[in-house]
Image (cartoon, rainbow, N blue to C red):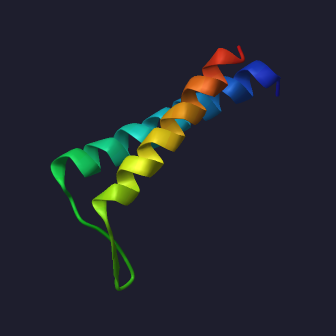
Amino acid sequence: MSINIYLIVSGIIFGFVSILHIYRARNNFPLILGTWEAPTKFSWIIGIITGSMSIYAFSLL
């Protein structure tokens, strides 16, 4: 597998995860992990981090 395919696939996956987290935070949907409900701030932070990782993956192409 070439590095370009890896970067494209990882960029798409990180972008998709980022969109889902930002969508969850924007619409205030609950995220429950076992008995713990993750705060909305958690999704904003993860959305920004994964979005940055997606942009970085595509910038390496």
Residue at left 69%, top 26%?
7
**Quadrant (top left/top right/bottom left/bottom right) for the N terminus:** top right
Q: Which of the pair 34/45 is nearer the observer?
A: 45
Residue 38 at what x, y percent from top left?
35, 69
Percent across and percent down for residue 10 are 63, 34
**Which residue is located at x 39 percent, y 58 percent?**
42
Counting from the top left corner in percent of width and height, residue 27 is at 17, 49
Expressed as whole percent of the image width and height from the top left, the position of residue 25 reads 26, 50
Q: Residue at x 27, y 43 (%)?
A: 23
Please state if 51 lies on the left or on the right of 43 as rendered.
right
Q: If the image is split into quadrants, where does the C terminus sit?
A: top right
User: Taking 18 as reference, is 42 above or below it?
Assistant: below
Q: Which residue lies furthest to the bottom in this view?
A: 35
User: So how many labels did they put on this image?
Assistant: 0
Judged from this view, the residue extending furthest toward the right is 2
Question: Where is 34 relative to 51, above or below?
Answer: below
| Residue at horizontal 43 percent and vertical 49 percent from the top | 45
The residue positioned farthest toward the left in the image shown: 27
Quadrant of residue 54 in the image? top right
